[in-house]
Image (tube, coloured by chain):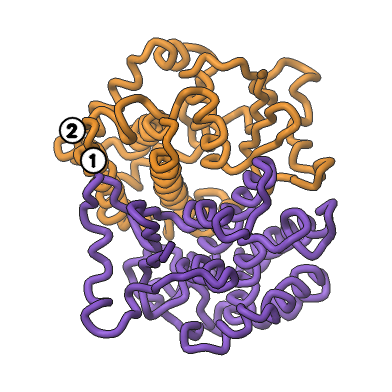
Chain colours: A orange, B purple
Amino acid sequence: MRYELYYWPQIQGRGEFIRLALEEAGADYVDVARLPGRKGAAFDRILERAADGRTPFALPALRAGRLVIAQTANILQYLGPRLGLVPKAEAARLWAHQLQLTIGDLVGEAHDSHHPIASGLYYHQQKREASRRSVNFRNERLPKFLGYFEDVLRNNPAGDRHLVGRSLSYADLSLFQVMAGLDYAFPRAMGRMRRRHARLVALHERVARRPRIAAYLASERRIPFNEYDIFRCYPELDR
Amino acid sequence: MRYELYYWPQIQGRGEFIRLALEEAGADYVDVARLPGRKGAAFDRILERAADGRTPFALPALRAGRLVIAQTANILQYLGPRLGLVPKAEAARLWAHQLQLTIGDLVGEAHDSHHPIASGLYYHQQKREASRRSVNFRNERLPKFLGYFEDVLRNNPAGDRHLVGRSLSYADLSLFQVMAGLDYAFPRAMGRMRRRHARLVALHERVARRPRIAAYLASERRIPFNEYDIFRCYPELDR
């Protein structure tokens, strides 16, 4: 099965959670918008009316044969068993998906820390509000989320190296991405928090060293973090 | 199977999407926090460490036998096939879940229209920012979401009475709840939009007339809308 990923070509964004799963599994996939020339043009037509009426609201979307699937966590849930990135048992799959949705909530709040008024406005148009929201994000929300995921690792009966069971899942890959993004966007706040979240820090480092992930991160396929993306380095929001 | 729902007893909130599915199906369930006296006390202990390490980040949570499941869309995905509220085919289930996650995004943005800075602060502490965010919500985001769901109904090959296939799904029930909440919170904005979204308006009315839903809405089990909830009636945010 050759998968087609549809996502914006200039950012990691929410598409990156899908890219990491496909890369770790060595899956056969194309990142449609990044194909050269005409092949990648107008990739966003997938947001127009689909033949079966099942048009996504937003990207990322994945084409798998005749299926078009959207919503990041939904795509990962679909790919998980096919790529060997989630255990087989239903209870474990529900748990992995639940964690992925909670990661998605954290990602949304990280985004809103610089865009609290409107995604459609520039940062400089909502800088004052972003300053206020980011204080709350750094002091309340970020510690709450990181403390939660640290506890999930600590309390995993199969060991604290993975979120779900005894082997790598797509949720671990997504948590790696969140840690990388938070380190980029909030180096000061994250620096203060590293000591209390040793398991998260170790998971981040361990995933980065996995051969396929390391090769991906060193390749041109990995788009650098930048200030059009979810995780943005604005020092004024990271006191 | 007797299901146990864990959610805050004073609000509809995200728990309402679960309540509506259980009510429509005539399922055997208890709303734990609303049990009289000691039985309902400390219902939120479910947020403390679970025996299997699978503790939710937040409510709602559902207990089904030995399973504890959280994240609204995840719970509905679990309940859907068990309550006969989603088609059997995998493609249809993925589509229903995708729509549910998109409904969840709209619900989150409706909440943030009055709480753009922090959930932990009062509305009056972020009134100025809420005023700005609600303009964007009413003028940009709300029409985009409603237009999308109207299109989903229009483009459903099985007919425009349901979001997924030819029969009622949990996504229809959730969209009913969103329409009810938006009508409560934004009566002026919604009044302007009714004509262009005839299918959504019809779905809202049709679900409200279903015998079990009508009985539920007329019962004491239906908590009234109020200003501690996701959908709040603040006239200054609804110009």
| Residue B153: quarter of image | bottom right
Q: Is residue B33 left or right of residue B101?
A: left
Q: Is residue B52 visible?
A: yes
Quarter of the picture holding the N terminus of chain A: top right
Q: Position of residue B154 (x, y in %)?
A: 83, 58
Q: Position of residue B71 (x, y in %)?
A: 44, 55
Give the labeled residue for mark 1: A150
Compare marks 1 and 2 and give the one earlier in the sequence: 1
Q: Position of residue B76 (x, y in %)?
A: 52, 57
The amino acid on which the numbered mark 2 sits, given as a three-letter code, is Ala
Above-or-below relation of B5 to B102: below
Q: Is residue A66 left or right of residue A153?
A: right
| Residue A103: quarter of image | top left
Mark 1 near mark 2, Cβ–Cβ under 8 Å?
Answer: yes
Q: Is residue B181 left or right of residue A213?
A: right
Residue visible at 61% across and 37% down in the picture: A60
Q: Position of residue A158 (x, y in %)?
A: 24, 31
The amino acid on which the numbered mark 1 sits, given as a three-letter code, is Glu
The chain that hosts pointer 2 is A
Q: Report the front residue among A174 and B119.
A: A174
Q: Report the front residue among B74 and B136.
A: B74
How far, Cα to Cα, is label 1 from label 2?
Answer: 8 Å
Above-or-below relation of B130 to A211: below
Above-or-below relation of A223 to A54: above
Q: Is residue B57 left or right of residue B14?
A: left
Residue visible at 55% across and 30% down in the picture: A79
**Which disc, if any, is residue A198?**
2
The crowding category of the residue bearing disc 1, from other C-alpha atoms within 10 Å (few below 14, some 14 to 19, many at least 20), is many
Q: Report the front residue among B215 and A147.
A: B215
Above-or-below relation of A219 to A177: above
